Amino acid sequence: MDHVHGNYDIALVVFSYLVAVVASYTVLDLVGRISTSVGRFRWLWLLFGAAGMAMGVWSMHFIGMLAFSLHVPVAYDLITVVESYIAILAGSFLSLIVVGRERLEVRHLLGGGLLLAAGIVAMHYWGMEAMQINISYDPYYVALSVVIAIGAAITAFWLSFYFRKGKDSGKMWKKLASGFIMGAAVVGMHYTGMFAAEFYLGDKFNSTAGIILDQKRLAYFIACGTLLTLGLSILGIFISNRFASKESEIQAGFTWYKSLFDNNQDGIIAVDLEYRITGFNPAMAELLGLNGDLPLNRSIDEILHYIAEEEQEHTRESLQRSFSGELQNYETAIVRRNGERVELHGINVPVVVDGRVVGSYIIARDITDEKRYKNMIRHQAYHDELTGLPNRRMFNQLLTEKIESKTERFAVMVIDIDRFKMINDSLGHLYGDQFLQEMSRRIQDCIAGMNVTAARMGGDEFTLLCDGAYSYRDLSKMVERIIRAISYPYRLKDNDFYVTASIGIALYPGDGSDAVQLLKNADTAMYEVKKNGKNGYRFYSSDLNNKLQDRIELEAHLRKALAANEFFLHYQPQVRAANNELIGVEALVRWQHPSRGVISPGVFIPIAEETGIIYELGTWVLREACRQMKEWHMAGGPRIPISVNLSSQQFHQANLGAHIHSILEETGLEPQYLELEITESMMMDPAVSNSILSELSEYGIRLSLDDFGTGYSSLSYLKLLPVQKLKIDRSFIRDITENPNDKAIVATIVSMAKHLNMDVIAEGIETKEQLDILMDNDCQKIQGYYYSKPLPAKELEALFFASREKE
């Protein structure tokens, strides 16, 4: 066997290495590109990648073979050369299918590496067979070349997967360095395989098949062509990556937009200039109540017919304005297929492309609940929460609008409920609220069908705004109707309660040209009604203003009167008629005004009650009365009780019993010599009243029911209360000699008191005839002018105590 030895062209060896490096770099880029491609583009990239990879590896191999020259000319079988290229092409294609995926697992890496290594090994040793010379191989070096091929292939694919992750700015240089390493591995495999070969002359060398190639020229030509091809491949990949990056950004932007469009809670419709619907998100379908039948590419009119009829015109106008480039904000409403009305807030956003409006986005948000809440808040701001009537703010607004409208004439009425505070204090706010609700219903019933607005100004005060079409007579009839309706009994807490109304009326423009003056004058008329016995109405007149000013002055001075010691007490004797014995006295407060002289309690007590001064005044009266009676006792006067009236406010004040007990301890008067006079109106809530009265009774204080028979409350609870005395009101005594009904009432009261083991006393006795009738009915205890008017302490002592001492 004639062995043939050869040598290498170093320049071609270097060229082969460069080709291997470029091929390796190309592989690193190709695998990453294939992994991000889908569909038919993936298969195109697989074919392109396999061809480029095969070209690089095959060119390196062929140049490496041409770099080796023997001492004898060697021909090449071109068919075998082509077949060797097909081997590497097949290995490249199959391996890229395995590893060209987004997520690379170990089994994919090993499988792809083995397929590529098989293609490289097959290409190398099949390409060696193209040489028309006999070749034998060293098995050890052949195995080593196979191991190098497998290692190079697996490393190449792993690096390609590694480098496509992240966005490292130095990734290109790392990839290039990896290309040099992989190129060395691929070249190492080739030259290891070449080293394993031994050439010798034989039958194959003598064959005439094949052609002899110009090794250097062909090698340089293939190297340059391959480098150019691979360079173009790299450039193509680079350009493709740039386009892919741009496309990826566009796709990401579209995905974000699509997500915003589809998942937006607001309904969105995209409309072009031809009024065609080009987009429709799920929120809009839900808003309109559509079930999947979205009107895409159809006219917007299919949606506009859902708009409430009264909203259609301005909704369409808003859309047209948006086509001219104006952003539109508006409110509208739709009516769903099921008839449900939905309030919407709409925004029309012009779509501008290249400076030209091409359509509009219609964005709609359901504001039904929001609008309902706003309306509810607005209603609450202008209406009374308890009765639902307009409140003070709304009434003043309506009154101002009425004046500004230059209406020739209209009326303002102020209604105040007499004795409401008594109900509220005795029964509590819950029942007081029920009472006011019933009150407002009665007032509204009385003005139903009339052009009259009722309002609650606060507390128990109501107002009416009446149209100017009504005459004095019409207004009077309406007011009388209201007074009558209010006077009917109210069923509260299993008892009937009675109240009355005081109504003042002011007319525009005669009684005031502005809202403040009209209400003030109506109030003045109402207070005049209260002053004259309540339960009535009055039109304002100019003389009432003078009375009001007088009242205001009295109120201002009343606040200072207590500190100025202007109050004093008179005492009216209570006598047993059978023997003219003094059995008690009643303390009555008087006011010594510095300029007006003595003012009657009937004038200043109502003012004190309304202003709250009654608490301080009542305490002073109690203390002074107890002090005076103790002084009389200490001076040897008769051991008789002193009676003091309690107002409703005093009766319901906190810790009343302890407060009175402290006054008794302060003055030294024994409790049994203090008699508190209360009225029937304080007894409206027997549970509360009984608790207060029982506490007072436990202290030893005597209790008397004043003005008995004038109230409207039930008598059924009287036997349950710890009251020791009934006081017959003077209204029954005044006409007792002429009115048989009064005589019968007095006889009934006296009889009832006897059966309940109560004392009974009559007040207001002025004549002998009145006294005789009372004595005939066994009423022995008397108080009135017949015996004595209220006297100062000294005069009382002179008239009654002195005569007693003489006896």
Image (cartoon, grey):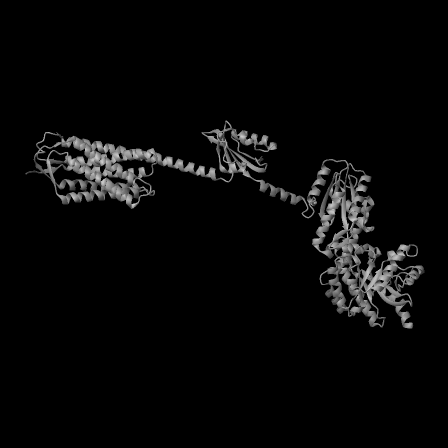
| Residue 454 visible at all | yes
Q: Nearer the viewer, residue 196 or 558?
A: 196
Please report the residue visible at 15 percent of the width from the left and 38 percent of the height from the top: 10
Residue extending farthest to the top is 274
| Residue 563 visible at all | no
Residue extending farthest to the right is 769
Question: Is 16 drawn above or below residue 635 in the view shown?
Answer: above
Please tell me in which quadrant of the rendered image residue 571 appears: bottom right
Q: Nearer the viewer, residue 582 or 692?
A: 692
Q: Position of residue 244 (x, y in %)?
A: 35, 35
Please tell me in which quadrant of the rendered image residue 126 appears: top left
Please report the residue visible at 71 percent of the width from the left and 43 percent of the height from the top: 395
Relative to residue 626, is residue 330 drawn left or right? left
Relative to residue 334, is residue 105 drawn left or right? left
Q: Position of residue 104 (x, y in %)?
A: 31, 43
Relative to residue 346, is residue 418 drawn left or right? right
What is the total number of numbered labels drawn onto the structure image?
A: 0
Where does the C terminus fall, quadrant-wise?
bottom right
Where does the N terminus fall, quadrant-wise?
top left
Please tell me in which quadrant of the rendered image residue 745 appears: bottom right
Q: Position of residue 500 (x, y in %)?
A: 79, 50
Relative to residue 370, is residue 716 drawn left or right? right
Q: Nearer the viewer, residue 250 or 369?
A: 369
Q: Nearer the viewer, residue 551 or 156?
A: 156
